[in-house]
Amino acid sequence: MESSPVSADSMERSARSTQIRRRAADVASRLDGEFPRPSNGDEERYPSRVGNFSKGLPHNELGEVDPDAYDALLRALLSGDFAAFEALPLGGRQKLLNPLGGLAFNIEGPDSPSIVITPPPAFASADMAAQMAELYWMAVCRDVPLSAYENDPVVAAAVRDLADFPGYQGPRPVTPQSLFRADYPGALDGPMVSQFLLRPFRYDGIPIEARTRVPLPVINGEGIDFLTYYDEWLAAQRGFPEKDNQFGYEVIEPGQAIFDPVPRFPRSVRDLGQNAGQDTINSAYFRAVLTVDRLNGGAEQRLLNAMDITNPYQRSKTQRGFATFGSAHLVTLLGSVHKAERHTWYLKWNMHRYQRPEVFAGRVHNTKAGEVAYPIHPRLLESPVLDAVWEYNELVNRRRGTGRKGSYLLPILFPTGSPNHPSFPAGHAISAGACVTILKAWFDEDAVIPNPVQPNADGTALEPYEGAPLTVGGELNKLCHNLSMGRDMSGVHWRADDVEGNRQGEELAVRILREARATYPEPFAGFTLTTFDNKRITI
């Protein structure tokens, strides 16, 4: 589509700029839909709030939140008053993470409450039970090399069990190749780990190899996990009380992770979980840009050649892009991902207040122990994964010298468990969805990755991958999966957090790109990309 020349006259530009901003605001308002948004109903269904987030507040011995403290949290959220949060009673030393973050206004793209997503599974549902079973299996499979999935007996048990769960939302049929993965275009092809997490790249001219710090394995190693015994789990829900705390809670200090002295290429669920816990939200997507640059020879013009055909400078004889349709433009778009986090934080704190997996696992543990009968779907309580996670936790507890036996708690990769903010949707997932959507709009998704690789069994080297061709679009979708479900692999998020977060991020990026298109002076036919639902769209 050809565009009209854009005047350089300051008076004319001022009027045009105001017109563009007003039009964007009008369009955003029409797209916002109806309020209020639907929730899963658990907060109203259970007066004890056993189905919602409450970490860091005072809790009883069953890990159930003090009702007055929870009501105070609700009042603070409704008020939006910083001082109201300052007055909240906390059960320990861990502070709540940015409960006001979702109320910041965006002046680019949609406002934080605007994008509608499907509510998360309810506490007693089959979908919730299947999500929990998947996380338990991820935990006991943490140290199985991804290259060994086809023949590993624990992986085979996970495949059989999850295939039989009526609420399982992962790719079907469930196979060793599809296990723990997302059914996005190209994301099921080849190795689980994206090429963009394996290839070397240059940062400010500094050559960087993609091996990273990872924890020692538990199985066939000397590693440990956390929240594997009940007192530690309860301390985590209370925010790890300090000595002489006002509630008389037992004081248990957070543990310390044991890291491998050898950096590794991510070769297991444990490694992917650690990788998704040590990034800086959008750093993996900057790496993807630098990796595309390296794959295409390292020069800016080569990077331009990898861009989508709709880029107006692809066919220019005399011009190159930079501030528009060049590398500066792209990294600026990726750097605006903080807008996505505001959307996530609104839904986390002001809408769903969805509990973390570690909390639901505590409900499972107390139900199995006969302490209380929560309405957990019976399919989960009958799953063989519970015996497997008991044995796993028993091994960890023995190694940690706790004197405890096993438990039905979810072993977490991080010493304090999940972060102190609600689970749904995942911040990593919406950032991944937004950034990958921008990258798919920018680059040629159909381009084939040259000389693909995969980690060896111990992650010390890369080996050639000789299967079906891997494309830029498929590997970007896989990168989205790695950084989203990597959080599940560490034990701190659910599949629903990822899928809905990815879709929310995609919609956010599409709306930002649609607004941005009206600001460009070049002749531009629009951004073209394939969505996570495998639809080809032009923005």
Image (tube, rainbow, N blue to C red):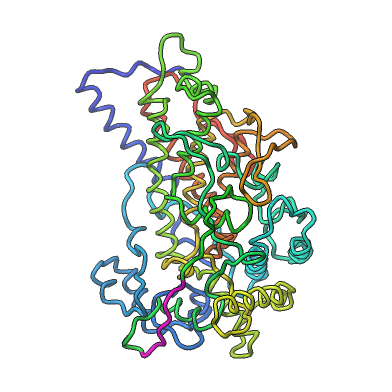
| 391 relative position to 16: left or right | right
Residue drawn at x 46%, y 54% is: 278
70 is higher (above) or lower (below) than 13? below
Q: Can residue 514 be seen in this view?
A: no
Q: Nearer the viewer, residue 25 or 199?
A: 199
Q: Residue at x 39, y 82 (%)?
A: 58
528 sits left or right of 102 in the view:
right
> In the orientation shown, which residue stands out farthest toward the top?
317
279 falls in the magenta region: no
Q: Which of 452 and 218 is in front in this view?
A: 218
- Residue extending furthest front? 261
**Residue 95 figure quarter:** bottom left
Q: Report the residue at 49% width, 77% height from top.
A: 44
Q: In which quarter of the image is residue 57?
A: bottom left
Q: Secondary structure of the magenta portion, mostly? A: loop
Q: Quarter-wise, where is residue 282 in the image?
A: top left
Tell me residue 416's x, y (percent): 45, 70
Magenta-highlighted residues: 248-255
Above or below 58: residue 1: above
Q: In this view, does 386 lie above or below 462?
A: below
Q: Is residue 2 above or below residue 358?
A: above
Which percent across, then down, holds residue 104? 31, 54
Residue at the image position 53 percent from the left and 65 percent from the top: 413
* 172 and 44: which is toward the camera: 172
Q: How many labels does the image show?
A: 0
Q: From the top left corner, tell me how far across and down residue 122 is, in percent.
A: 58, 70
Task: Judge by depth and name the residue closer to the eye, 286 or 214.
Answer: 214
